[in-house]
Image (tube, rainbow, N blue to C red):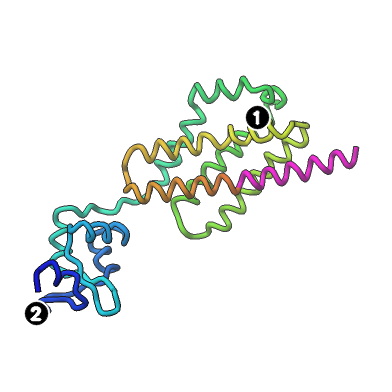
Amino acid sequence: MRGDERAHSNEPVGHGERRWLTIRDACALLGVDQSTLRRWSDAGKVPVFLTPGGHRRYAEEDVLALAKGTARPRRRISKQALTEASLSQYEHDHYVTDVRQRPWYGEFDAEGLAEHRRRGLAMVDLAVRYVSGRTDRAEILAEACEIAREYGRDSARHGFGISDAVEIYLRARTPIIQGVIQFLDQGAISSSRAGRIFTDVVEFMDRTMSAMMQQYEHDLHAIHHDA
């Protein structure tokens, strides 16, 4: 049997002193996800053997050899870096100037503007906690949705049309998304994790925007009904 045939046979070859690893164990040694290791295997970067049940097995020595040349330490997502990147967007001259030019801006007094800033800062904190962790996500999202509902109540109370209501919320969330993009552009984490972070922040924003619009429509209907 030729070498290339043996590498795809149903039994691992060269049992001897070799130690065989599952794909999960091999990924743990390399610090990569399973899709990445499968891609490397299919490209011939590391030998892979199939069990009779079709499961992938890797020789520990092959995985260790690969790790010495290509493995990189798994970097943690920095909550502080994410937060600072988002908050910096709120202070950017272009953002401040753009918001102040919006027709609805003049409808808010100093107290109302201060409240909007408080909500924005709170949303930054919640968004960062949402994308950087895997626990308490339901509670974090519930708190964020309640803040979003406050935006909806404000818009209905001021009698804003739906386009203004949406724009107010979009202006509030834009710095968060831009901050995340800025963080990801720094290349501090793998592309796969970057993709997951961006997907999570978009999901977070979509869910909160839905809560804002539901509250806006509810309050606007109530105001028209009372009138």
Mark 2 lies on a secondary structure that is: loop
Of tags 2 and 1, which is closer to the observer? 2
How many numbered dots are placed on residues in this image? 2
Quadrant including the N terminus: bottom left
Residue 70 coordinates in the image, percent (x, y): 18, 53
Between 207 and 83, the residue placed more toward the observer is: 207
Q: Tell me which segment is drawn in magenta.
A: 208-227
Residue 195 coordinates in the image, percent (x, y): 40, 48
> Pointer 1: residues within 10 angstroms few (<14), some, or many (20+)?
some
**Residue topped by disc 1:** 113
For marks 2 and 1, give the CA distance: 73 Å
Residue 126 coordinates in the image, percent (x, y): 53, 47
Q: Is residue 135 left or right of residue 44?
A: right
The overriding secondary structure of the stretch rendered in magenta is: helix
The answer to which image quadrant residue 103 occupies is top right
Quadrant including the C terminus: top right
What amino acid is at disc 1?
Leu
Q: Is residue 222 magenta?
A: yes
**Residue topped by disc 2:** 16
